[in-house]
């Protein structure tokens, strides 16, 4: 919204919002101040309205920066269809304490058992709590690192990932990695070890991780970093999506 040049107070507020990085506050304070005058709102109510606008805008920006492929919330997970997943364990993951402690989360189970739903749901809850989150698949991350390495900007990409409070890494183990890919991925885990949290969703049990990596030593080192002090959730082998599809088919037949 353009600011009236004749009002020096608006100009000063605009400058302060820039300095304090309050984009939504800056964009809408003229509109909300006019509404407050019309409605004769109290100073506290006007301030609360501005703060709520800024908070809502930040929630939207965190969701966008996390790059979730689709919306998923923990509240929408059907625990009745997957009794392997305990609501109490999932409920604890809404807290930011484990993220602040840099502890890993490992979700293991067959396809369709709700791993990605839980991964995105946890990431969404942490983002809404005010922490930075980034979602990506393992193959996309390895490709990004390989391209950065070829362009001689690997260190900057690794530095960017090392600053994210929670890295959600999906489809871990879906594709086998060569030595270079494993080495690049290892650098990410090393940078984040015990200081930043990483959540991994995989369909491969720990005993099969040696098939993912061409280098057994790197496999052991990565597994050590992912599993140390981790929260482990095993989502089982019965497809969550298949059960839902069968249930819909049965209800339609009736």
Image (tube, grey):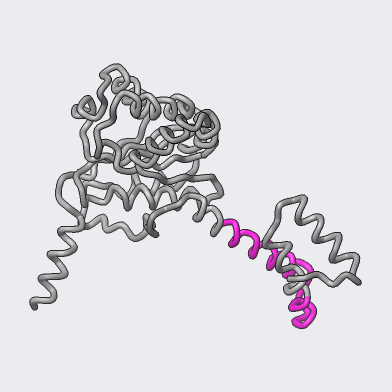
Q: Where's residue 70, x and y in %? A: 38, 58
Q: Where's residue 252, x and y in %? A: 13, 76
Q: Residue at x 20, y 58 (%)?
A: 241
Along the line of sight, which residue is nearer the eye, 10 or 158?
A: 158
Left or right of 20 in this view: 215? left
Q: Residue furthest bottom?
A: 38
What's the magenta bit mostly, secondary-structure-wise? helix
Query: Height in image: 90 above or below 73?
Result: above
Q: Which residues are magenta?
A: 34-58
Q: Where's residue 99, x and y in %? A: 48, 38
Q: Residue furthest left?
A: 253
Q: Residue at x 54, y 59 (%)?
A: 60
Query: Height in image: 217 above or below 225?
Result: above
Quick one: quadrant of the N terminus? bottom right
Q: Where's residue 179, x and y in %? A: 31, 23
Along the line of sight, which residue is nearer the eye, 88 or 143?
A: 143
Left or right of 133 in this view: 235? left
Q: Residue at x 60, y 61 (%)?
A: 57
Residue 47 magenta: yes
Quick one: quadrant of the C terminus? bottom left
């Amino acid at each position: 919204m353009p600011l009236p040049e004749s009002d020096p107070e608006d100009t000063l507020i605009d400058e302060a919002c820039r300095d304090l990085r309050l984009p939504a506050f800056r964009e809408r304070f003229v509109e909300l101040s006019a509404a407050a005058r019309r409605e004769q709102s109290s100073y506290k109510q006007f301030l609360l309205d501005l703060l709520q606008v800024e908070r809502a805008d930040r929630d939207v920006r965190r969701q966008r920066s996390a790059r979730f492929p689709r919306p998923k919330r923990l509240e929408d997970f059907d625990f009745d269809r997957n009794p392997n997943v305990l609501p109490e364990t999932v409920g604890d993951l809404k807290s930011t304490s484990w993220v602040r402690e840099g502890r890993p989360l490992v979700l293991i189970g067959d396809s369709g058992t709700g791993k990605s739903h839980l991964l995105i749901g946890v990431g969404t809850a942490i983002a809404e709590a005010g922490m930075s989150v980034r979602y990506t698949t393992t193959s996309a991350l390895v490709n990004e690192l390989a391209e950065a390495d070829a362009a001689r900007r690997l260190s900057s990409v690794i530095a960017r990932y090392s600053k994210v409070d929670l890295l959600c890494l999906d489809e871990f183990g879906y594709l086998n990695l060569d030595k270079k890919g494993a080495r690049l991925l290892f650098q990410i885990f090393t940078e984040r070890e015990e200081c930043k949290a990483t959540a991994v969703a995989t369909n491969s049990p720990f005993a099969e991780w040696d098939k993912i990596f061409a280098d057994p030593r790197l496999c052991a080192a990565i597994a050590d970093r992912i599993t140390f002090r981790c929260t482990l959730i095993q989502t089982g082998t019965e497809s969550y999506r298949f059960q839902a599809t069968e249930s819909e088919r049965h209800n339609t037949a009736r």
